[in-house]
Image: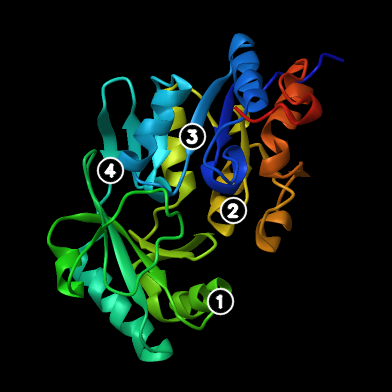
Amino acid sequence: MAAPPLPALIATDLDGTLLRGDDTVSVRSRAALAGAAREGARHLVVTGRPAPRVRPLLESLGCTGLAVCGQGAQVYDAGSGSLLWSVRLDRELAETALGKIEAEVGQVYAAVDQDGVDGLTLIEPGYLMPHPTLPAIRVDRRDDLWREPISKVLLRHPGLSDDELAGTARSVVGSLATVTMSGPGTVELQPCGITKATGLALAAEHLGLGRADTIAFGDMPNDIPMFQWAAHGVAMANAHRELLAVADEITLSNEDDGVAAVLEKVYGLRPEGHENGAGRP
């Protein structure tokens, strides 16, 4: 019996998955992605980060192809520096959804990612960025968040856990927006019906590939739609329990180069750059 074909598309989340805690991609992971590319595989970053916050990382990896950003609301072409596709979150619906959430749980602190390749991340007073290395601009009041078109809203609560906040938000927001939890301190509102699977499917189609060709890696509940779409979903050892429950496979943590470990096995690659802890750039 012939061996099954190798995956032609590798879809990786960033935070908690391909990236280590210091926002770097290790030598081993870079080598594994390069080795898979020599076998004909394409790599797609599929992340909650908006395109402007992904661009520097793509440049450091030498990526000139596509990336799925903003929880699937954006398909970004690194080669041309343009968005091939984007969906905005209606600002009035976002305000209404935020009001419904606060009616249930009290005050939350909000931030927004503006639409576009040069969109800013704006944060209202009281909001703390979960990723302090990512640039953000503090505004004086919430109304300032809605000055320009947005792709999503980020929420934090001073007392509730992420699971509690996300669960309450889903129960009251309804069809106003899609609620996702994408990392510690990161509950988000995005356009209704938009998920990572939406953007991944569009990007794959653009490349002439499909779900049967795809292996996906992730760590948080926002990766569940991507796992449901792809032929094979691999969760990191550090993944949220909801993603672990639906994964086809569980690998090492992001700190231990879990993506690289699977790619080396799948594509028959020799591990590089991780002996004696040498995996950090």
Comes first in the chain, label 1 or label 3: 3
Q: Is residue 246 left or right of residue 105?
A: right
Comes first in the chain, label 2 or label 3: 3
Q: Which residue is mark 2?
A: 224
> Mark 2 and mark 3: span between their CA atoms?
15 Å
Q: Which mark is residue 161?
A: 1
Q: Secondary structure at mark 1?
A: loop
> Mark 2 and mark 4: span between their CA atoms?
21 Å
Comes first in the chain, label 2 or label 4: 4
> Mark 1 and mark 2: span between their CA atoms?
20 Å
> Mark 1 and mark 4: span between their CA atoms?
30 Å
Disc 1 versus disc 3: nearer the observer: 1
Disc 3 versus disc 4: nearer the observer: 3
Q: Position of residue 159 (x, y in %)?
A: 50, 83
Task: Mark 1 and mark 2 in contact? Answer it, CB < 8 Å.
Answer: no
Comes first in the chain, label 1 or label 2: 1
Task: Mark 3 and mark 4 in contact? Answer it, CB < 8 Å.
Answer: no
For badge 1, the amino acid type reads Ser
Q: Quick check: can you spot residue 187? A: yes
Q: Residues within 10 Å of mark 3 (few under 14, many from 20)?
A: many
Q: Secondary structure at mark 3?
A: strand
